[in-house]
Amino acid sequence: MNMRELSSFRGGIRLDSHKGETQNIASRTLPIPEKLILPLQQHGGVAAEPCVEIGQRVLKNEIIAEARNYFGMRLHAPSSGVISAINKFPVIHPIGLSTDCIELTTDGEDMARGLNTVNDVTSLETEAVYQRVAEAGIVGLGGAGFPAHVKVQEAIGQTVDMLIINAVECEPYITCDDRLIQEHPGEVLAGAALIARVIDAGECIVAVEEDMPAAMAALKGVPSARIELVSIPAIYPSGGEKQLVTILTGREVPTGLLPIDIGVAVLNVATVVAIFRAVFSGKPLLDRLVTVAGDFCSPGNANTLIGTPIKYLLEHFGVSDTSNHRVLAGGPMMGTEILNLAAPITKTVNCILVLHRETAENLSNACIRCGDCLSVCPVGLQPQQLFDAARTSDVDLAQELHLFDCIDCGCCAYVCPSQIPLVHYFRYAKSSIEALDRDRAVADGARARHEQQLQRLSAKSKIGARSGLELADVSALDPSELERDIKAAVSRSSKRRQNENEL
Amino acid sequence: MNDLTHPVSSPHIHDARPVPWIMRQVLYALIPAITVYVYLFGCGILVQLMIAITTALVLESLALLLRGYTLKAYLSDGSVVVLACLLALAIPPYAPWWVIVVGVAFAVLIGKHAFGGLGYNIFNPAMVGYLFLMLCYPAALSKWPEMSKIVDYPGLLESVRLIAAHSVGMPDGVSGATVLSHIKTQMVLMHTHSEIESTINFGTFAGYGWEWVNIAYLCGGGWLLWRRVVKWRLPLSFMVGVGCAALLGHVIDAELHRGAVFHLFAGGTMLAAFFVVTDPVSSSTTPVGMLLFGLGAGLLTYCIREFGGYPDGVAFAVVIMNALAPLIDRFTQPRFYGKTSNTKHI
Ligand code: SF4
Ligand code: SF4
């Protein structure tokens, strides 16, 4: 079926897909919940700035918070109602923190502000398309949540040889992209064509996982001239951005760089549809498809308003008692446990997974150095050695072993016979190294300023023959070192950004 | 809640092949060899196994308690039982009881726990225990029952009596040397292989009995490979190491050096190939490293057998390679994704 020679990436695992449980059930639309909780920060960037007041009436589509900068993201009211609070609310967070949110009490009338539609997207200028994407508040819907307009802009600025529309849902259970394609194949392909035109991509590929036959058939049913459809083997994590690039091009993305640096743009399929709707009908990102699946009897997909409390969503799928279950946001391999079900659905949540709470096996968690983790790691890292480095807080060794190339995919911890929470150690190590870097950069900055000040003072006091020399010393020493340290810190954090962007 | 011991971190599903399961498979894989032992030597091995396992469990519990660990999680991983069994299989079946007790004690307390317990023991504990015995009580380790002379196999009670008797060696006419140690002594006396062969029962190809023991280990090992408990790299490269070295020696001088088949099925070769060098904790973990480790251990085993002062070289070879494993790992890191600097557009 594939015309294209596919390459493979190293490692990876075949997982039990569980997709059949929801794949062929039409998605439903929930009634509007009474309250919507809209976190001001729904992605990696800066939190948005509220532009409404408590008590203010808002219409659907109205902007309620503005982006603070280029990497920020604006927020729209998903339905009509009254702003009832701007406060901290529990959100999906690994340790259950609360963050600033806008609470919208809906009136059920769903009155909408008119949208600015265009009749012919094919004639829109590149700049106009970019503008409409930025205004719609779209982030990567595949889970990473990178601002879509930034990604589009990056692609516009570069020569793009290949645009990949990523519909490879490699995590078990999740079928929201699958349903989206089955239900709106036309929009997927029109969106792909639109973006391919705007970024002037050499070729455009829609990549679908091999266990999504109905989605593939739906795409084939729509005539599209320039877009190639490719079916990808179901080996986790084939939907990881870099892994997918390798499968389709046979090339690896060099460490520290993004696919765009080798001329490949990758966008998630749901993001593409959101972009198409934004450009075509001016529709901001108000809702998304969410898979609700796991160990209960009536799983499926739901078109869910952003801000819908997870508890509300679950109740509509007949799940009310979760005392013996763990509820996860995202898939079983990379998802986050939701500690408070009052937390809302955000733009990046593709799945709510309800799993039986397993009785944890009583294991010693000692690494027996079996090497299983090494053979499945898609990045070719040595998790067992990284584990040693992380456990002993050996920062240098961890970085030498390429800790920051780890994509948190979880393959290593999945196969580990000692069930060591490897990913947990790696995340912990990454965040502590970053904190260290930040502190160091700040401290170095402060020290440099302090020293400069001392030098200035001493120069002033010794105004005379040697002052020129001393001043020259300062400028010769400090800035270069400082710059190097800052550069190192910046490159690490950009690497992290790109890792987060990956799956 | 989110500390390192009770993480809520992803992934939330796991493959069900935990360590206790793996250790159980290893024990199952030893059954053929134990059966052959009983057939060849009588019930002595069963008594040794029982003493070894009991000692190991008691000492392991003691060590864990002293180090402040919970017994259940650590004892249940079964690694110490495997250790005990391997050591019991490595010593003569009618060695006095204290030999195995001392060996196991040294293996568990020094070989394993002094280095930090399971996962941190850089040397294979069973081999450490064996070496200790070999250095301290060489006489006790050399008294193997001479199979061709055993007429009445000692039963269970008789075995208990023999082992408890506290005397080194066997009743008259039963004690003897293994083929390897017999060759060693004879070679020192400048005899050639064809002369030596007339003085001991050489069996079909690797010494009467021993070939069967090795075949039994091979069967168990094959099963482990099939169950994916051990990967092919370590055992195969070890056998290639022993085999190639032996072939080379044999080609150079057939009268002084026996061939590859003999060395592969003599002494502890197969035991080492599937149950010792495959110990994940103390061997290499990188794919290339595993091959080097196996080859190195194989070559050393052969060299010590042929040129060293000890009849069998497995234990020394493995321990030497254990010491080199971290170095090997370091220099054989797999290529990681994105190591390219090629930023040319596609
Ligand atoms: S899979 Fe687990 S036990 Fe095996 S080497 Fe990796 S971390 Fe160690
Ligand atoms: S989580 Fe990191 S170390 Fe583990 S398999 Fe994935 S990329 Fe490799």
Image (cartoon, rainbow, N blue to C red):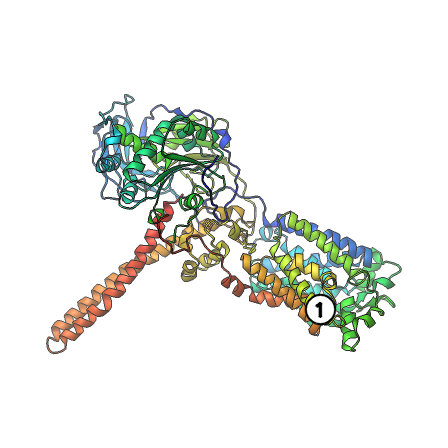
- Kindly identify which residue carries mark 1: B251
Q: Residue at x 64, y 68 (%)?
A: B300
Residue B42 visible in image:
no
Rendering coords of residue B277 (x, y %): 63, 60
Rendering coords of residue A125 (x, y %): 22, 35
Rendering coords of residue B83 (x, y %): 66, 58
Q: Is residue B119 left or right of residue B171?
A: left
Foreground residue among A74 and A36: A74
Compared to A471, does A70 lie above or below? above
Residue A128 visible in image:
yes
Say which quarter of the image contains residue B309: bottom right
Say which quarter of the image contains residue B305: bottom right
Amino acid on which disc 1 is placed: Val
**In the orientation shown, which residue stands out farthest toward the top?**
A109
Foreground residue among B176 and A265: A265
Subunit under mark 1: B
Q: Is residue A466 left or right of residue A70?
A: left
**In the orientation shown, which residue stands out farthest toward the right?**
B151
Q: Is residue B132 left or right of residue A492?
A: right
Q: Is residue B303 left or right of residue B328?
A: right
Instruction: Provide the secondary structure element on which disc 1 rests.
Output: helix
Mark 1 Cα-neighbour bin, 10 Å: few <14, some 14–19, many ≥20: few
Foreground residue among A461 and B68: A461
Say which quarter of the image contains residue B65: bottom right
Foreground residue among A200 and B78: A200
Rendering coords of residue A124 (x, y %): 23, 32
Q: Assess mark 1: CB under 8 A from ligand 1?
A: no
Q: How many marks?
A: 1
